[in-house]
Amino acid sequence: MTIESLQKKWNRENWISIESGKNNLPKVVLTTPNSLCEVYLHGAHITSFKTNNKKVEHLFVSEKSIFQDLKAIRGGIPLIWPQFGPGSIQTHGFARNIDWEISRVFVNDKSQSVEIEFTLHSSEYSQKIWGVTNEFKTTYTVTLHADHLDLGFDVRNVGQIPIEFQLAFHTYYSISDIENVHVLGLKNRDYIDKLDNMKIVKEQRRELTVRSEVDSVYLNVVPEQNYQPLQLVDLGRKQTVTLTYDYQNIPDVVVWNPWIEKSKKMDDFQDDEYKQMICIEVGVINKPIKLTTNQLFQTKHSIIPSPMPAKEPSL
Ligand SMILES: O=P(O)(O)OC[C@H]1O[C@H](O)[C@H](O)[C@@H](O)[C@@H]1O
């Protein structure tokens, strides 16, 4: 579809506007009086989420990101599906590399929120990569509220045999400086240290800081008594971002920062950009989801920024 025909079908005055993005790829701009969110059809990839009268950007996108067919955008929220990391198909699956279709929009004047739904069906392309028998219908719902973002991801097995997948919302948060941030909510959780032979380690720290490369998959981060929510605290911005997610279905949490050497090796990332971002990814990684014929998987994730509380609860 051309940008003009997309505009004709989906534009809603003051709330939804289809625009030509980087490299002329179509992007959807959602706005409420206080917030803004941009989503490329390519990968249904969110590249911007702003609140505070659209002045504070919460997502990081690399200056060197390539906006091109079959290549993932570096930053924002890549959708990792149906595989996390390397495996039998390309690293992190194919959902982030291809175009999704808009299937529904909804403006809620009363609650001052706006919603858009994207759909991805099995296709010749997915069959070539993932096999002809893996048939699916996937929907991704992005709801922009005045001060937070809700994401919904559903998969239905529309084929004849079971399908199996992993999933992650691979969010790159924009931060004042890596030295100013810490992550709360992971203390006493076991994680797979991908940088140390996949060793399983227990997290000892209440405040997780990053001072070198980190690539850790925290397992089964479900609420316990005296639960400290998963939060990114930025002392420079005086801001906290609280991450809530459907603990039953997407219980794993990845923390990733490439640090100096790895940054230099990535051709779509500036050498010093590791200081401006941290990835905190919620998903289902350790125990893939299996869906039988016609079975539906549904999950939710929310990103909730707020000014930093004067004093953090000490748990
Ligand atoms: O370069 P990408 O394919 O986007 O992957 C970037 C990173 O994603 C995740 O966080 C993985 O745990 C890392 O191992 C990987 O390096």
Image: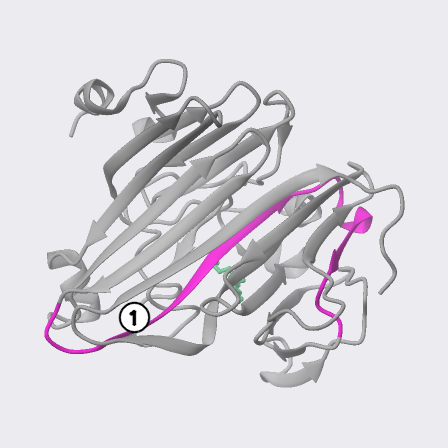
- Nearer to us in this view, 299 or 6: 299
Above or below, comparing residue 180 to residue 211 in the picture: above
Query: In screen coordinates, is 296 left or right of 27?
Result: left
Check disc 1 and report the residue beneath it. 89
Tell me the element at label 1. Answer: loop
**Which quarter of the rendered picture does the C terminus lie within?**
bottom right
From the top left corner, tell me how far across and down residue 142 is, in percent.
Answer: 40, 41
From the top left corner, tell me how far across and down residue 222 is, in percent.
Answer: 60, 71
Above or below, comparing residue 259 to residue 224 in the picture: above
- For badge 1, the amino acid type reads Ile
From the top left corner, tell me how far across and down residue 271 is, in percent.
Answer: 63, 47
In which quadrant of the rendered view does residue 226 lie?
bottom right
Magenta span: 159-187
> Could you tell me if residue 162 is visible in this image?
yes
> Could you tell me if residue 264 is visible in this image?
no
Above or below, comparing residue 169 to residue 277 in the picture: below
Task: Name the residue at 26% across, 55% down.
Answer: 138
On whether residue 11 falls in the magenta region, the answer is no
Count of marks, rendered view? 1
Instruction: State the residue lying farthest toward the top.
Output: 13
On whether residue 184 falls in the magenta region, the answer is yes
Task: Name the residue at 81% across, 62% down.
Answer: 207
**Beta carbon at label 1 within 8 Å of ligand 1:** no
Query: In screen coordinates, is 283 left or right of 304?
Result: left
